[in-house]
Amino acid sequence: MLNPDALGRLGAALAKYSIIRRDAVDAIRLLLLTGARPGEIFGLTWQEVQQDRLVLAQAKRGPRSVA
């Protein structure tokens, strides 16, 4: 868990690197917002991206939905 100060520093670092490594920054933000596991996000396909949620076919404990 990140305290407010650490979350602020992380946000500043992500903003700094968003131009250089936008894909990595977006993946980290998605991890923070969804609580999904890194392997679930880095292995994500467009078929798993729905309008308001992720429908993960290859999750650790089987298919699941992440809002």
Image (tube, rainbow, N blue to C red):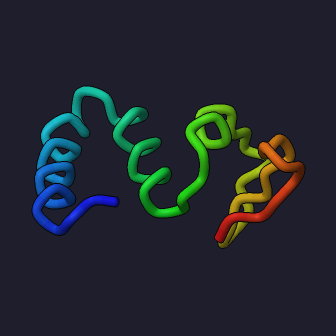
Q: Residue 8 location, x and y as percent?
A: 14, 60
Q: Please give the name of the residue rendered at 56% of the width and 39% of the height, measured from the top-left corner.
A: 38
Q: Residue 37 location, x and y as percent?
A: 60, 45
Q: Residue 36 location, x and y as percent?
A: 60, 53
**Is 61 left or right of 18, judged from the image as shown?**
right
**Is 29 left or right of 60, judged from the image as shown?**
left
Quarter in which the N terminus is drawn: bottom left
Quarter in which the C terminus is drawn: bottom right
For the image, the number of numbered tags is: 0
**Position of 28 relative to 11 (above/below):** above
> Of residues 19 and 34, which is closer to you in this image?
34
Q: Residue 4 location, x and y as percent?
A: 17, 68
Q: Please give the name of the residue rendered at 68% of the width and 33% of the height, measured from the top-left corner.
A: 43
**Is 63 left or right of 66, judged from the image as shown?**
right
Write down the quadrant of residue 54 in the picture. Answer: bottom right
Please, which residue is most extreme toward the top here? 20
Q: Please give the name of the residue rendered at 79% of the width and 58% of the height, measured from the top-left corner.
A: 55
**Position of 5 relative to 48 (above/below):** below
> Of residues 35 and 56, which is closer to you in this image?
35
Q: Please give the name of the residue rendered at 82% of the width and 59% of the height, measured from the top-left corner.
A: 64
